[in-house]
Amino acid sequence: MDNFKTKQNIGGLSGEIIIPPDKSISHRAIIFGALTGGKVKIKNLSLGEDCLNTLKIFEKLGAKHKFTSKRDLILDSSNSFNAPKEALYCGNSGTTTRLLSGFFAGQNFDVELTGDESLSKRPMKRIIEPLSKMGAQIISNENKLPLKIKGSKLEGITYHSPIASAQVKSCLLLAGLNADNKTKIYEPSLSRNHSEIMLEYLGASITTGEDKNGYFVEIEKSNLTPKNLEVVGDISSAAFFMVAAAIIPNSSIIIKNVGINPTRTGIIDVFKQAKIDFELLNQKTICNELVADIKVNYTLNIEPFEIKGNLIPRLIDEIPILAVLASQAQGKSIIKDAKDLRNKESDRIKTVVEAFKALEIETQEFDDGFSITGKKEINTNVTLETHLDHRLAMSYYVLSLINKKEMTINGFNCINTSFPEFLDLMKKLN
Ligand code: S3P
């Protein structure tokens, strides 16, 4: 079913779903869990290919794991890590590559990191440069994969990251965990802080704050304490259902157990701007991460919205599906200050604009974003390419639900990267 044909055939979406575990937090649970050097129970791990690639890498290093139920496992890293015998495959996952580079840079063995076609095009200079300042030895293919990392002794630095990137920040935190002296990372606006939250939870010596130079996090060499971890639901996965319910007439759904860490809830701010009919219910905290159930109802009059500045890192992965929301707004929505979208699993500015033009939706490309003029009925027979980008595939699927004509999505299987349960949950709401 890699070329997926779909045609609008549904009334409204209704019912309740439990959203699968957060991808970012799952990666961190495996990585930080394995760094405790003990046994850690991880509850509700993402079964997307990206996280399974992170898990397989730790298996190759000698950390053992055993699933006790579908998404719960025990990770045992009581033995010290071995040098891997072969190159370590990171698949489609930028998070695996960038976070683990920080960890490998300070080990006493060498590794080589490889990835799929999409990952092999993505820039790694953003981590190679600061890691090299810490003393790392990395050979790359012109700042792209494969990366050959020679384990070295690292020295803490103060680094002013030019971009708000949780992958860069977390990479340097992992390097800093193993470096002499303190490592301090500044970022221009606050990117997702799951690493900071989990490192603190596991007892690392870490502080966060804001001063005249921006947001910072500081870490020093510390041991992590083995503690059980639980992963909350993924707001980036929930986003597809949130938007689908908002734009498909007669919909009313509840999405349960969604992580609503404020560094991830840019979509909620956009829903407020767009005047979507939604509610947050049953808020609680799991492993220091905020969680809620989200109720979304169909909204007839959707206001156009503007996404820019500090909002960008808080919804960076939701931009393709928010573009779908924009297609149903009454006017022109604008997304800017988002140039890093060009470095995601695909160039998401180019690919989104191309797809929307093919669907005859009015759109304009900028260097750092795009505009979309909404409220046009979509009635176009079209084939769209996913370019191995899971979030495009799922956004196009949601578009297909409001397209009156048949749509083919080429390369649809890439949804397994983050969200293998996507179609089953869609069916559940039909
Ligand atoms: C992620 C951070 C984001 C995001 C990615 C996951 C993470 O990337 O796009 O899907 O888990 O740290 P950047 O930090 O590079 O923006």
Image: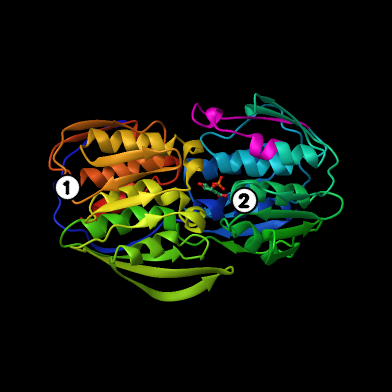
Give, as a three-letter code, the residue at label 2.
Ile
Q: Position of residue 5 (x, y in %)?
A: 21, 34
Considering the numbered disc 2 on the image, is that residue within a helix, a strand or a loop? helix
Q: Is residue 247 left or right of residue 260?
A: left
Q: Which residue is mark 1?
A: 376
Q: Quadrant of residue 106?
A: top right
Q: Is residue 334 left or right of residue 35?
A: left
Q: Is residue 113 magenta?
A: yes
Nearer to the camera, 45 or 196? 196
Q: Is residue 140 above or below residue 174?
A: above
Q: Which residue is mark 2?
A: 30
Whether residue 89 is visible = yes
| Magenta region, residue range | 110-128
- Between disc 1 and disc 2, whose residue precedes? 2
Q: Quadrant of residue 272?
A: bottom left
Q: Is residue 273 above or below residue 373?
A: below
Residue count near mark 2 (Cα–Cα under 10 Å), binned few <14, some 14–19, many ≥20: many
Label 2 beta carbon within 8 A of ligand 1: no
